[in-house]
Image (cartoon, coloured by chain):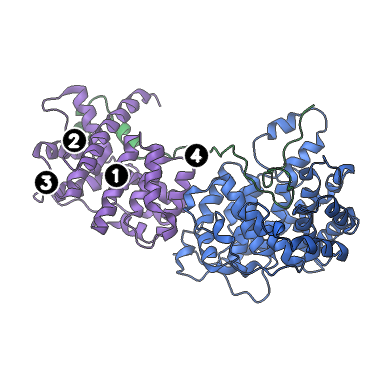
Chain colours: A green, B purple, C blue
């Protein structure tokens, strides 16, 4: 009974489709961190809210 | 792959089926897994394929509530098992998924044949915790209270790794993997208390629950968790 | 089942880490001018983040490296040289005193100064001045995040103002100290937790001072945090987490996470510098002219963190026991 003929009876959906669905690759990670700046500073800067490490990029112009 | 149309239709059918199972898990009643009586042709084929892909979870509500399945339901389930045996070169998850269905058949109908010998777990033996968790999540239908197999025993030996995989899945917003891993975590001994599984399941449902495959695993996990305490 | 320690693998990664630390510190040294305090170091509208912060971070990492390495180690000499350079920039501490008179209630002068104090470079008049203010209720009540507060407490301890217990009362108020669900981790929580650990461990001076439950918690959850930061190209945070891992390992005995290190080291620039993240990198490269300033700002911090983490990973205080015992549940996983 477990033959390819049996599988062929179920037209349209192939065994390959089934098996692909049963052996999925991992989804891509989705990363989005908050825009809320953490009120941290590594060592210094009491007057402003500062991000811990990334010193802000110099303003253009 | 030029089969994208087929796989889309199959995905949709699987999700429809899963929605029914979710309702049954929430409501405590039976899902009617089977397509309406007399559906032949493409719709019937699609529904059958969906049962095969959803696998043992197609009969999960009855398994968890310990009520015997509707005979028509069982017949479709059996038909799906017989129509789609693993091919010669099938991936381990395909083999284990099929074996899980065979075991479920046996539980639901003790007059059924014994499930075949378990596939092996060689592909998991050296796996990183990332790969392990992903594969376990794909095989979430194997995570059942009171049921044992080589995969669940292997998982039971690496609970911290599965917990790490859960955390990783949440951080990556891979809700299906998170939900499947969460389901396993309800069963495994030795999971660190700090993981916060209950709120974790709530969170996964919040973020990913519009996908019926996510909702199914979360609901399954909750039912199994309650069962363990109750 | 934990992976048995593989002496060859440990030796290989140690060599790679030492080389990486050496290159990174050499790059840092080549950018001394960018760390120099400019004309506006004391100006009322000067940007502290572009002056005192980088200098303080440079001094801290170099103080740790000097402390953890043998005098004969080239790393030691270079770190010591940079530390001395930084001290000269402060006019051997004189600028702190001037800063304190300009901003008597700010905490950052003490925080930065304490780095030098911990390395034996002191300015007694500044310490006395700081102690006066530190006796006020206002100082104790300075509104700060709990994590930052820990840093101030550590600074006070270094300057002999107060003692710092192993479990200060502020600790449970921090994200890490509350042992939260590990899946609530994100970038901001990440930067908070790393600094809690750095302050508790006094930046490597007292690395086995972590409360045991914290060490276990970190051992359990660092792997997914590291893995996902690396995947997201958050190199700076990944470097800090690797430093945390090295600190926690002094209590738990975990092996150096070689695979994670490999991924971080693969992200380095041509001279061993480490970028902050992958974002903006393309813009930076395509920017007009020699945009050295932007390049420095995009690399200096993560490069310093890589030095810090690498040195912590390859040095262990004398007399520590051997790494992870077999069968310990935290040491799960197949060898990678």
| Disc 3: CA contacts within 10 A as few (<14), some (14-19) or many (>=20) | some
Numbered disc in front, either 1 or 3: 1
Q: Tell me residue B218's x, y (percent).
A: 33, 44
Alpha carbon of mark 2 to alpha carbon of mark 3: how far?
Answer: 13 Å
Q: Is residue C258 left or right of residue A53?
A: left
The image quarter in which residue C200 lies: bottom right
Q: Earlier in the sequence, mark 1 or mark 2?
A: 2
Q: Image point 47% across, 58% down: which residue?
A: C334
| Disc 1: CA contacts within 10 A as few (<14), some (14-19) or many (>=20) | many
Can you tell which mark lies on residue B68?
3
Can you tell which mark lies on residue B219?
1
Q: Quadrant of the C terminus of chain B?
A: bottom left
Q: Earlier in the sequence, mark 1 or mark 3?
A: 3
Asked if residue B48 shows in the view, the reply is yes
Q: Are marks 2 and 3 in contact (CB under 8 Å)?
A: no
Q: Are marks 2 and 4 in contact (CB under 8 Å)?
A: no
Alpha carbon of mark 1 to alpha carbon of mark 4: how far?
Answer: 24 Å
Q: Residue furthest bottom?
A: C319
Vertically, is C248 above or below B2?
Answer: below
Instruction: Give the residue number, with chain letter if any, for mark 4.
Output: A29
Q: Image point 58% across, 45% down: which residue?
A: C187
Numbered disc in front, either 1 or 2: 1
Alpha carbon of mark 1 to alpha carbon of mark 3: how far?
Answer: 20 Å
Can you tell which mark lies on residue C215?
none
Instruction: Give the residue number, with chain letter if any, for mark 2.
Output: B33
Which SS class for mark 4? Answer: loop
Alpha carbon of mark 1 to alpha carbon of mark 2: how far?
Answer: 17 Å
Q: Earlier in the sequence, mark 2 or mark 3?
A: 2
Asked if badge 1 and badge 4 are on a common chain, one would say no
Number of callouts: 4
Alpha carbon of mark 4 to alpha carbon of mark 3: how far?
Answer: 40 Å
Q: Quadrant of the N terminus of chain B?
A: top left
């Amino acid at each position: 009974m477990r033959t390819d003929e049996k599988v062929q009876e179920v037209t349209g959906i192939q065994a390959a489709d089934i098996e692909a669905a049963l052996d999925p690759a991992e989804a891509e990670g989705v990363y989005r961190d908050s825009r809320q700046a953490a009120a941290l500073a590594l060592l210094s800067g009491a007057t402003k809210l500062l991000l811990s490490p990334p010193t802000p990029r110099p303003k253009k112009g | 792959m030029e089969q994208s149309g087929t796989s889309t239709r199959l995905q949709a059918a699987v999700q429809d089926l899963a929605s029914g199972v979710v309702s049954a898990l929430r409501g405590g009643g039976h899902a009617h897994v089977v397509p309406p009586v007399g559906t032949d042709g493409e719709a019937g084929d699609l529904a059958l394929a969906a049962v095969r892909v959803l696998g043992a979870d197609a009969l999960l509500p009855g398994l968890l509530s310990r009520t015997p399945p509707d005979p028509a339901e069982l017949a479709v389930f059996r038909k799906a098992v017989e129509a789609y045996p693993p091919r010669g070169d099938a991936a381990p998850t395909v083999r284990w998924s099929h074996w899980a269905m065979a075991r479920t058949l046996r539980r639901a109908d003790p007059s059924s044949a014994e499930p075949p010998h378990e596939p092996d777990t060689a592909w998991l033996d050296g796996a990183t915790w990332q790969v392990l968790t992903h594969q376990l999540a794909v095989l979430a239908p194997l995570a059942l209270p009171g049921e044992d197999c080589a995969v669940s025993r292997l998982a039971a030996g690496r609970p911290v790794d599965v917990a790490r995989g859960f955390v990783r899945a949440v951080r990556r917003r891979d809700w299906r993997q998170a939900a499947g891993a969460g389901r396993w975590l309800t069963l495994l001994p030795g999971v660190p208390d700090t993981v916060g599984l209950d709120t974790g399941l709530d969170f996964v449902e919040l973020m990913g629950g519009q996908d019926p495959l996510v909702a199914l695993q979360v609901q399954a996990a909750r039912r199994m968790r309650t069962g363990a305490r109750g | 089942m934990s992976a048995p320690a593989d002496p060859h693998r440990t030796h290989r990664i140690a060599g790679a880490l030492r080389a990486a630390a050496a290159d990174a510190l050499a790059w840092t040294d080549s950018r001394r001018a960018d760390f120099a305090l400019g004309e506006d170091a004391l100006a009322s509208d000067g940007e502290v983040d572009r002056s005192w912060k980088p200098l303080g971070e440079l001094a801290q990492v170099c103080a740790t490296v000097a402390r953890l390495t043998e005098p004969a180690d080239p790393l030691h000499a270079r770190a010591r040289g940079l530390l001395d350079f930084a001290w000269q920039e402060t006019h051997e501490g004189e600028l702190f005193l001037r800063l304190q008179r300009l901003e008597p209630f700010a905490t950052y002068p003490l925080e930065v100064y304490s780095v030098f104090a911990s390395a034996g470079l002191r300015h007694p008049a500044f310490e006395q001045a700081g102690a006066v203010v530190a006796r006020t209720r206002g100082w104790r009540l300075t509104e700060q995040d709990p994590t930052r507060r820990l840093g101030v407490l550590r600074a006070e301890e270094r300057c002999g103002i107060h003692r710092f217990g192993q479990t200060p009362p502020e600790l449970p108020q921090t994200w890490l100290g509350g042992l939260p669900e590990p899946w609530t981790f994100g970038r901001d929580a990440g930067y908070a937790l790393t600094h809690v650990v750095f302050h508790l461990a006094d930046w490597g001076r007292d690395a086995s001072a972590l409360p045991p439950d914290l060490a276990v918690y970190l051992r359990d959850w660092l792997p997914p945090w590291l893995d996902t930061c690396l995947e997201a190209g958050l190199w700076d945070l990944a470097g800090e987490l690797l430093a945390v891992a090295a600190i926690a390992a002094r209590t738990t005995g975990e092996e150096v996470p070689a695979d994670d290190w490999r991924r971080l080291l693969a992200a380095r620039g041509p001279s061993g510098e480490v970028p902050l993240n992958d974002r903006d990198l393309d813009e930076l490269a395509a920017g007009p002219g020699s945009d050295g300033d932007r390049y420095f700002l995009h690399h200096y911090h993560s490069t310093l963190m890589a030095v810090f983490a690498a040195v912590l990973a390859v040095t262990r205080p004398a007399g520590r026991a051997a790494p992870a015992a077999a069968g310990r549940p935290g040491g799960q996983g197949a060898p990678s």
